[in-house]
Amino acid sequence: MIHLYYGENDYAVAEKVRAVRAAFAAKYGAEAIERIDADEAAADDLVGKLVNVDLFASRKLVIMSGAARRPSTWQKLAAALLRVPNSTEVIMIESKLDGRLNATKEIKKIAGATEFRALRSWELERWAAEEAQRQRLEVKGAALRELVLACGGDQWRIASEIKKLSALGQVLTPELVKKYVESVVSADAFLVLELALRRERQAMNAELQKLRAVESAEKFLGLFSAQVFALAVAKSAGEEGSAAAAKATGVHPFVMQKTFAVRDEISESELQKLAAGLAEVDAKMKLGGDGWQLMMILLNRI
């Protein structure tokens, strides 16, 4: 059997591969599994791994990643898949696929292709609830929403934090998340933008002061500018959905969905002034200006 697992949700891909690998190892032994990085092997060697019968094992599992990044290798694999013996199971892992290539179309026809897309915010919360239940972690209130935001929608980190929080032996509350989970700066940058757009200046200034104590102004400016870029994309997307806008621009789907929720809080002219103001802040910082003070002045004028 041949599987093609692809998409930007590398956590879900890894979990799927782990499950298949564990089931195969339990039945045929771990020594019958071979993992190959296509970037480090010649195309003919990769084909040989797939089509040659292993004389010392009745079954074989080959896990291959990154072949689609090399078009010539991808084409050779497409031609070779029909020659894979029944005794060999193949898992092909790719983060991105070029659907225009004939090789991609052929491989999708031959393999059982499954796309793993990035989860939307509500899907992340639902998945986090399932993970918390699996870890026997009792949850109250909006704790999982707080956790997802603090982790910036990163499933790897959310899973890790749930495992650590479950070890506390306490009911998970929003307050507990704030106490034990360090928020990623990108999430803090979005919070500042959201507060600024809603003119909640007291809360915004408090958040900026908190960040000033732990983060450099240069890093925050870069992350905040990325949030403003996402906001500009959301404003120009019209009726286009957040998932389509994220895919077209490379902005993370979780970030784009959050941004869509606040895009009507600012006008086009205000957004242009904000972008121009950020460029001015950047220029003044390079001349030695106090970045945090400059950001506070700018955002309090929105």
Image (cartoon, rainbow, N blue to C red):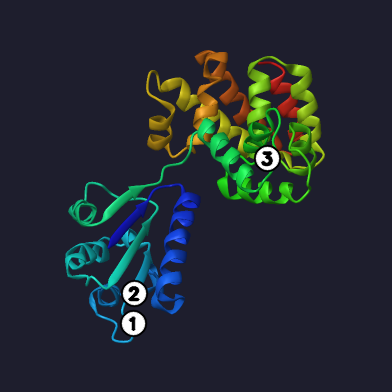
| Residue 22: percent from left, percent from top | 47, 65
In which quadrant will I find the C terminus?
Answer: top right
Q: Which residue is mark 2?
A: 60
Q: Which residue is mark 3?
A: 185
- Residue 221 is tagged as none
Quarter assignment of residue 16: bottom left
In which quadrant will I find the N terminus?
Answer: bottom left
- The residue located at (25%, 56%) in the rendering is 111
Quarter assignment of residue 126: top right
Q: Residues within 10 Å of mark 3 (few under 14, many from 20)?
A: some
- Between 222 and 240, the one lying in front of the other is 240
| Residue 162: percent from left, percent from top | 67, 46
Distance CA(mark 2)–CA(mark 3): 44 Å
Left-right relation of 18 to 206: left
- Tag 1: amino acid: Ala
Q: Is residue 102 above or below residue 219?
A: below
Q: Is residue 266 visible?
A: no
Quarter assignment of residue 85: bottom left
- Residue 57 is tagged as 1
* Lower sequence index among marks 1 and 3: 1
Circle 2 or circle 3, nearest the eye: 2
- The residue located at (44%, 28%) in the rendering is 242
- Tag 2: amino acid: Lys
- The residue located at (40%, 25%) in the rendering is 241
